Amino acid sequence: MYEFRFGGEVQQRPAPGSDQHTWGEYLYMRTNVSGIERAWWFHRVGCRRWFQAERDTRTNRVLRTGWPPLPGGVAGAVAASSAAGVAAGPGGSAAVTNAPPPPGNADAGGGDG
């Protein structure tokens, strides 16, 4: 399916001026959790926006989606209702709907899906 493109797990961006080791960890190291993961996704065919999704990597079940930041953290996702599509963002403001893509994924239209 090419409608959505995986953009990588959500993680804290290093502070400006961080050393090379910190940036290397941020760009290349992943936790690859077996369980609930919050990740960036790009809606390639529809709204062409980046959004976050929390999904159980063991079952591939999507627990919730939305514009960042998702309130409640990953632990709160278990109690959240399931979402089939992109949920409305908090307040629907443009400031949260056009979040920047995660590093290394600037070409959202490229790749093999």
Image (cartoon, helix red, strand yellow):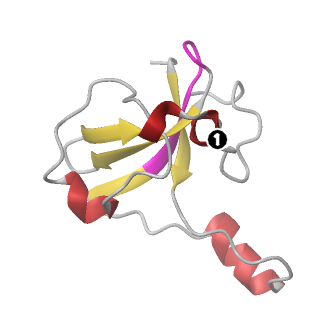
Considering every residue shown, the one lying at the far left of the view is: 79
* In front of the other: 35 or 46: 46
- The quarter holding residue 97 reads top right
* In front of the other: 80 or 90: 90
* In front of the other: 85 or 110: 85
* In front of the other: 70 or 14: 70
Amino acid bearing label 1: Ala
What residue is at 46 percent from the left and 37 percent from the top?
A: 91
- The quarter holding residue 65 reads top left
**Magenta-colored span:** 39-47
> Is 5 on the left-hand or right-hand side of 58?
right
Q: Is residue 42 magenta?
A: yes
| Image height of 35 relative to 84, above or below | below
| Image height of 47 relative to 103, above or below | above
Question: Where the C terminus falls, by quadrant?
Answer: top right
x then y, percent, for residue 96: 58, 42
| Image height of 4 relative to 57, above or below | above
Graded by Cα atoms within 10 Å as few (under 14), some (14 to 19) or many (20 or more), the crowding at tag 1 reads few
Q: Which residue is mark 1?
A: 95
Question: Where the N terminus falls, by quadrant?
Answer: top left
> Is 54 on the left-hand or right-hand side of 113?
left
Q: Is residue 41 magenta?
A: yes
x then y, percent, for residue 102: 66, 50
What residue is at 75 percent from the left and 75 percent from the top?
A: 23
